[in-house]
């Protein structure tokens, strides 16, 4: 019973994090509408615009994952020492797994907004405020 509650909590946290990343990515792509329109107007292919937005999301995910792990590992060890009287040491392979998960969630959540950005009409995008 206790393990299922823990796995449910972890799953809910991951889903919530992905939803937040998706909302932020969609907002970021919407704010870059004029830049996207300009890129398309000067001859960038829609595929290049899509890849550009996906690459940006991957970089943000990687930086966020690295910063998160860098701050979480010492905090986890300290919290474990306070609560359990023994420091908690995360597994050594955790850093690449966490960073890969952050990059993957960033790219997956950016896919639809990036595809939409690539299909933007340059004239309408440049007219927007």
Image (spheres, helix red, strand yellow):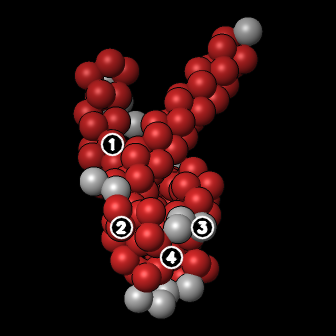
Pinpoint residue 101: horizontal percent, then vertical percent.
Answer: 56, 54
Q: Of helix, strand and loop, which one carries label 3?
A: loop
Q: Of helix, strand and loop, which one carries label 1?
A: helix
Tag 2 near tag 4, CB within 8 Å: no
Pinpoint residue 31: horizontal percent, then vertical percent.
Answer: 34, 54
Q: CA distance from mark 2 to mark 1?
A: 42 Å
Residue on which the image places disc 3: 119
Residue on which the image places disc 4: 49
Residue situated in front as seen by the camera: 82 or 21: 21
Which of label 4 and label 3 is nearer to you? Answer: 3
Which mark identifies residue 72?
1
Pinpoint residue 92: horizontal percent, then vertical percent.
Answer: 49, 58
Q: Of helix, strand and loop, which one carries label 4?
A: helix
Which mark identifies residue 126?
2
Q: Residue at x 27, y 46 (%)?
A: 71
Q: Splitting the image into 4 quarters, where does residue 74 fall?
A: top left
Residue 49 in view, yes or no: yes
């Amino acid at each position: 019973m206790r393990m299922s509650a823990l796995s449910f909590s972890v799953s809910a946290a991951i889903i919530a994090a992905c939803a937040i990343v998706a909302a932020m990515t969609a907002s970021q792509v919407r704010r870059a509408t004029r830049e996207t329109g300009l890129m398309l107007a000067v001859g960038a292919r829609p595929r290049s615009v899509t890849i550009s937005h996906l690459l940006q999301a991957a970089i943000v995910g990687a930086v966020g994952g690295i910063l998160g792990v860098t701050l979480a590992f010492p905090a986890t060890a300290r919290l474990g020492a306070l609560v359990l009287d023994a420091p908690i040491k995360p597994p050594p392979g955790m850093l690449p797994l966490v960073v890969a998960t952050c990059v993957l969630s960033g790219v997956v959540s950016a896919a639809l907004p990036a595809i939409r950005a690539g299909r933007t009409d340059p004239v309408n995008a440049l007219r927007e405020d």
